[in-house]
Amino acid sequence: MILYISIICISLYLISLYGIIINRNNIIVILLSFELIILSISLMFILFNSLAINASAVALVILALGAVETALGLALLSLLYKVNASTITSYINTIKN
């Protein structure tokens, strides 16, 4: 059972890395890929918690940091869309003020 869950965690991590590497122009896909990375890491920590390593507190901290990252990413996305009417990452330099 532990092997299957660890395979799921590793596959989620690899899928999200693939999403970041392939889709470098779309900021929405990059944010979703970062969320998948955070989810796979926290799932791995929860799996380690079942192996008698006290990692549930670390998983909660990681999920809280993921929520903060999502809020900041969505704020950046809304500002980018407001300025350029596009979500392409090459326009990020235009929102400097």
Image (cartoon, rainbow, N blue to C red):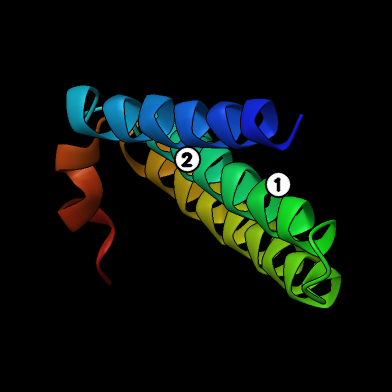
Q: Quadrant of residue 42?
A: bottom right
Residue placed most toward the observer, 10 or 62: 10
Secondary structure of residue under mark 1 = helix
Decide if residue 86 is in sight here. no
Q: Is residue 81 left or right of residue 62?
A: left
Residue 39 on image: x %, y %: 64, 44
Q: Is residue 91 left or right of residue 71?
A: left
Q: Earlier in the sequence, mark 1 or mark 2?
A: 2
Rendered view: 33 above or below 74:
above
**Residue depicted at x 47% and y 45%:** 34
Q: Amino acid at mark 1?
A: Leu
Residue placed most toward the observer, 60 or 35: 60
Secondary structure of residue under mark 2 = helix
Q: Is the residue marked by circle 2 packed among few (<14), some (14-19), or many (20+) residues within 10 Å?
A: some
Residue 25 on image: x %, y %: 21, 29
Q: Is the residue marked by circle 1 packed among few (<14), some (14-19), or many (20+) residues within 10 Å?
A: some
Residue 10 on image: x %, y %: 48, 35
Rendered view: 92 above or below 3:
below
**Residue depicted at x 67% and y 65%:** 68
Residue placed most toward the observer, 27 or 47: 47
Q: Amino acid at mark 2?
A: Leu
Distance from Cα at disc 1 to Cα at disc 2: 18 Å
**Which mark, by number, is residue 53?**
none
Q: Quadrant of residue 95?
A: bottom left
Residue 1 on image: x %, y %: 77, 29
**Residue tagged by mark 1?**
43
Decide if residue 36 is in sight here. yes
Q: Quadrant of the C terminus?
A: bottom left
**Residue depicted at x 82% and y 77%:** 54
**Residue tagged by mark 2?**
31
Q: Of discs 1 and 2, which sits in the foreground?
A: 1
